[in-house]
Image: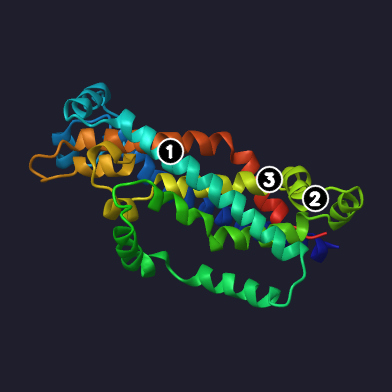
């Protein structure tokens, strides 16, 4: 009897130690994730000289002054928001809609090269987008589309990673009996997609919509190579303009500009976090 009690105590002790290490790791990783964002927020409230002089985790009282400096530098942040919204909303819509349409066609229809096409998409997911940037910019230049938003929006129609996610998502969320019933009732294929598939895939749409939105909003490399007109600069490009010569840069204003650039994404992500978790969970479960 005493041996059983000792084994029980030993087991509880090991469980307690394991939980302690797990919670410690979770807290440590959480701090690593939050600390850089917190430093950006803190530096946006401090003076430039203080930022250069020492590191601080405590907020300052210089936020309004930094925002005023930002406006004094003639940074058209409102225009940048409008430009970023045009690009982001358009690219997100095209990416989500056509990727879901492609994944739906692969999962529902039978054709000879179905598996070959699916594997081709998997291969495209593994190829870095930066590999084709130079050739893409050269093509855009020959088409006379430099300094326009079209090169930043149209490529979203073909998004292999989004197609891949929707393909995995539809394997668990798609109810083919509903599609067959709709066909029997005389509903057309696009009608089935819009009236049945889109409502059924809402969690996945919200999830990939947020990911596509964040990626498009924060995009810097490609817009920098295509956009040079000051009136068409997106928010990341405007913020990058603030970071000039280190002896003339007002770091407080730079950090304030960074806060303004990430604020919309943070608010949208916070508002849609439940849908994102639900979409990822549903996509990971199989009946």
Dot 2 or dot 1: first in sequence order is: 1
- Residue behind mark 2: 188
Looking at this view, name the residue that lies furthest to the front: 143
**Which label belongs to residue 16?**
none
Residue 46: x %, y % from top left? 23, 31
Dot 3 or dot 1: first in sequence order is: 1
SS state under label 3? helix
SS state under label 1? helix
Residue 120: x %, y % from top left? 58, 74
**Which label belongs to residue 86?**
1
Along the horizontal axis of the image, is 177 left or right of 5? right
Q: Is residue 236 above or below residue 159?
A: above
Along the horizontal axis of the image, is 197 left or right of 205? right
Which residue is rendered at x = 19% and y = 29% of the image?
74
Label 2, label 1: how far apart the Cα atoms are: 32 Å
Of the two numbered discs 2 and 1 in the rendering, the one whose residue sits closer to the viewer: 2
Quadrant for the N terminus in the image: bottom right
Q: Which quadrant would residue 34 be assigned to in this image? A: top left
- Residue behind mark 3: 203
Of 155 and 84, nearer the camera is: 155
Q: Kindly check if marks 2 and 1 are in contact, taking CB atoms under 8 A apart as contact.
A: no
Q: Kindly check if marks 3 and 2 are in contact, taking CB atoms under 8 A apart as contact.
A: no
Which residue is rendered at x = 54% and y = 52% of the image?
95
Of the two numbered discs 3 and 2 in the rendering, the one whose residue sits closer to the viewer: 2
């Amino acid at each position: 009897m005493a041996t059983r009690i000792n084994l029980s105590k030993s087991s509880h002790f090991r469980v307690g130690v394991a939980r302690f290490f797990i919670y410690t790791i979770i807290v440590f990783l959480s701090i690593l994730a939050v600390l850089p964002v917190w430093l950006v927020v803190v530096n946006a409230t401090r003076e430039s000289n203080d930022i250069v002089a020492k590191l601080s985790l405590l907020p300052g009282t210089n936020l309004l002054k930094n925002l005023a400096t930002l406006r004094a530098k003639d940074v058209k942040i409102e225009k940048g928001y409008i430009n970023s919204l045009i690009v982001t909303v358009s690219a997100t819509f095209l990416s989500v809609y056509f990727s879901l349409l492609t994944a739906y066609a692969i999962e529902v229809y039978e054709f000879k090269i179905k598996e070959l096409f699916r594997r081709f998409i998997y291969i495209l997911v593994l190829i870095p987008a930066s590999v084709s940037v130079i050739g893409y910019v050269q093509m855009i230049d020959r088409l006379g589309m430099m300094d326009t938003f079209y090169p930043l929006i149209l490529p979203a129609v073909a998004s292999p990673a989004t197609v891949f996610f929707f393909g995995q998502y539809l394997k668990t969320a798609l109810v083919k009996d509903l599609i067959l019933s709709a066909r029997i009732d005389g509903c057309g294929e696009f009608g089935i997609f819009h009236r049945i598939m889109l409502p059924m895939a809402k969690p996945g749409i919200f999830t990939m919509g947020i990911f596509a939105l964040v990626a498009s909003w924060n995009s810097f490399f490609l817009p920098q190579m295509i956009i040079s007109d000051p009136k068409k600069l997106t928010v990341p490009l405007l913020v990058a303009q603030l970071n000039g010569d280190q002896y003339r840069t007002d770091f407080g204003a730079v950090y304030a500009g960074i806060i303004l650039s990430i604020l919309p994404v943070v608010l949208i992500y916070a508002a849609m976090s439940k849908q994102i978790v639900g979409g990822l969970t549903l996509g990971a479960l199989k009946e």
